[in-house]
Amino acid sequence: MKQTYPLPVHHSWPLYERDRFFELGQLHGNDTLDPVPDLDDVVAPVRTARLGQWECDLTDNDRLSWSDEVYDIFGIPRGAVVARHEAVALYAEGSRTAMEKLRAYAIRHRRGFTLDVEIKPAQAPRRWMRLIAAPVCVDDHVVKLQGLKFLVPDAGGREF
């Protein structure tokens, strides 16, 4: 039986709101989450999620850097060298298309985005993952994308 995520998140946001949507240190440590009420649907699942940090260096052939948690989410042995095209191939078709469109928009317009995607991990069943991304700019050029990836638990605390 195919399980679907009930309330997918999909939106773009300007870089000046970066701290409003996530602060890598705060989210990763689960210390303090953004108290803004309209962001509860974006940040509330983080309290129980296994957070993974990631980075994609656009100046170095889209070289990926992942924390151990991201390797676990994708079912890939920790520390393995993963090319971006290999990681993208693990996204379900519709999710891959949405992610690539938002990614291109984020790079072109220097905007962050939040998106729920369905992935097909290498050594695990299909699941839903929340992807939070923000560009890193040098002058007016985006040189990296970085952010968080985490499995979103359902109402019963089970991860999709």
Image (tube, rainbow, N blue to C red):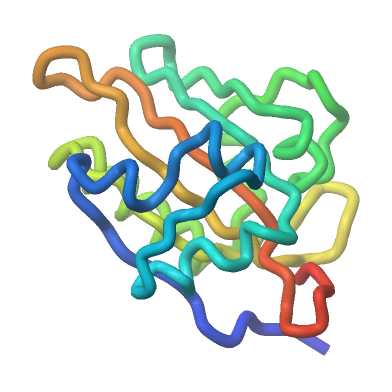
Instruction: Please state the horizontal and vertical placement of residue 96, each as a whole percent of the image.
Output: 49, 57
The residue depicted at 72 percent of the width and 56 percent of the height is 49
- Of residue 82 and residue 23, the one placed in the foreground of this image is 23
Q: Can you give x and y, in whole percent of width and height, for residue 153 in the image?
A: 73, 70
Image quadrant containing the N terminus: bottom right
Left or right: residue 56 versus residue 38 is: right
Q: Is residue 76 left or right of residue 149?
A: right
Residue 88 in percent (x, y) is at: 56, 44
State which quarter of the image contains the C terminus: bottom right
Q: Residue furthest left?
A: 140
> From what the image shows, is residue 126 above or below residue 106?
below
Q: Residue at x 77, y 52 (%)?
A: 121
How many numbered dots are placed on residues in this image?
0
Q: Position of residue 84 (x, y in %)?
A: 55, 31
Query: Would residue 105 be found to the left or right of residue 5 on screen?
Result: left
**Residue located at (65% from left, 52% from top):** 150
Q: Residue furthest top?
A: 60
**Relative to residue 154, is residue 108 depicted above or below?**
above
Q: Nearer the viewer, residue 78 or 147?
A: 147
Whether residue 6 sits left or right of residue 113 in the image: it is right
Q: Residue at x 45, y 39 (%)?
A: 23
